[in-house]
Image: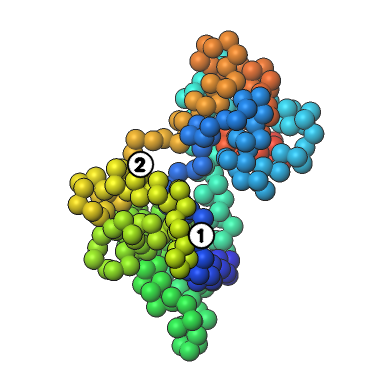
């Protein structure tokens, strides 16, 4: 099963990471955005593409010629212009970006649905999920201690029951989407916060202190110095994470950290795209303005990281 493979890979990575310094781990639940990043050169969007997509994903753009890209981008612009007035507003861009984000989530669920709906009744019961994901470990008890199986099974069951709104222990597609992508659903936010706390709280006191916060991002070498970014994160913990200044984060403070309510990624990305492409500064974009700046849009979330430009128009 795909999820089981990811599970094993994640556990292996976690084990390996204990022996050497690690890169900073990002727990905040937002897509990487452009507008928080400094631009080295406003005439070149390679920095934007790599910061927003990652280097490998940014290469998707190279699959099409500029002419093909502009043609397909123009068709997407027509879809974004919901009131067909010839202008793309920040609100319309925001709506489109949110739609693209949501589509990714539901497409991800669709890809794995048949792996878990074993009896093909268009629902996934807890027993089906448990068998598909943990069947091997349930059958061979001697293998369970090699992984965190005994910890993860009840944790998954708790999350599954939280997503199961009607309490029938069988998830429809919407409930299963909440199970796999809990950060996307308001009623699942508490479980995301709780799981984050459990991941980081190594001493089991129900809080995250500064050392636990840092250890989640950075594994020390014996006697090795801390990088400058770690020192900055310590300051972040003191100044912005520990809101009541008691030296540790409770669940409310963890929620404020990983799910900031005062930042809307889609809004920020939409504003960024308008700001960079609005030649006449009327706070709206025409199709011509977007196509003039096509190199930015094909690498932005407005086109699902460029992926929409490689799809047939009928798929959009």
Q: Name the residue located 40 percent from the left edge and 49 percent from the top edge.
A: 231
Image x and y of residue 304, in percent: 60, 40
Q: Residue at x 39, y 35 (%)?
A: 263
Q: List x then y, in percent, for residue 48.
A: 60, 35
Q: Secondary structure at mark 2?
A: loop
Which image quarter is the C terminus in? top right
Identify which residue is drawn at 52% across, 66% down: 20
| Position of residue 244 in the picture relative to residue 44 (left or right) | left
Q: Position of residue 19 (x, y in %)?
A: 50, 70
Q: CA distance from mark 1 to mark 2?
A: 25 Å
| Res. 260 mark | 2
Residue that mark 1 sits on: 22
155 in relation to 259, above or below: below
Q: Is residue 27 left or right of residue 16?
A: left
Give the mark, 1 or 2, whose residue is nearer the N terminus: 1
Is residue 181 visible in the rendered image? The answer is: no
* Crowd tier of the residue under label 1, counting other residues whose Cα lies within 10 Å: few below 14, some 14–19, many 20 or above: some
Q: How is the image coloured?
A: rainbow
Q: Residues within 10 Å of mark 2 (few under 14, many from 20)?
A: few
Disc number at residue 10? none
Question: Do the residues bearing badges 1 and 2 touch, measured as CB atoms within 8 Å?
Answer: no
Image quadrant for the N terminus?
bottom right
* Residue sitting at x 47%, y 77%: 147
**Image: 2 above or below 291:** below
Q: Position of residue 276 (x, y in %)?
A: 57, 22
**Residue 145 seen by the camera:** yes
Q: Nearer the viewer, mark 1 or mark 2?
A: 1
**Secondary structure beneath label 1:** loop
């Amino acid at each position: 099963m795909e999820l089981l493979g990811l599970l094993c890979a994640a556990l292996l990575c976690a084990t390996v990471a204990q022996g050497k310094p690690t890169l900073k781990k990002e727990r905040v639940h937002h897509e990487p955005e452009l507008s928080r990043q400094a631009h080295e050169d406003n005439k070149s969007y390679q920095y934007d593409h790599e910061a927003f997509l990652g280097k490998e994903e940014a290469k998707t753009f190279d699959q099409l010629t500029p002419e093909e890209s502009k043609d397909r981008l123009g068709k997407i612009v027509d879809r974004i212009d919901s009131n067909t007035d010839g202008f793309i507003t920040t609100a319309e861009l925001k709506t489109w970006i949110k739609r693209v984000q949501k589509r990714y989530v539901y497409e991800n669920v669709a890809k794995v649905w048949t792996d878990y709906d074993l009896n093909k009744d268009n629902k996934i019961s807890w027993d089906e999920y448990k068998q598909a994901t943990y069947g091997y470990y349930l059958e061979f008890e001697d293998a369970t201690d090699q992984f965190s199986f005994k910890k993860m099974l009840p944790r998954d069951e708790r999350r599954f029951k939280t997503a199961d709104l009607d309490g029938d222990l069988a998830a429809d597609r919407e409930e299963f989407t909440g199970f796999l992508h809990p950060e996307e659903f308001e009623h699942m936010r508490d479980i995301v916060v709780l799981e984050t706390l459990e991941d980081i709280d190594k001493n089991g006191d129900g809080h995250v202190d500064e050392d636990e916060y840092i250890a989640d991002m950075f594994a020390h070498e014996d006697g090795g110095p801390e990088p400058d970014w770690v020192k900055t994160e310590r300051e972040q913990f003191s100044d912005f994470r520990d809101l009541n200044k008691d030296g540790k984060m409770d669940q409310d403070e963890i929620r404020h950290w990983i799910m900031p309510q005062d930042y809307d990624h889609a809004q920020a990305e939409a504003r960024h795209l308008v700001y960079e492409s609005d030649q006449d500064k009327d706070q709206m974009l025409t199709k011509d303005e977007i196509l003039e700046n096509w190199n930015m849009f094909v690498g932005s979330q407005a086109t699902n990281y460029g992926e929409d430009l490689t799809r047939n128009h009928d798929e959009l």
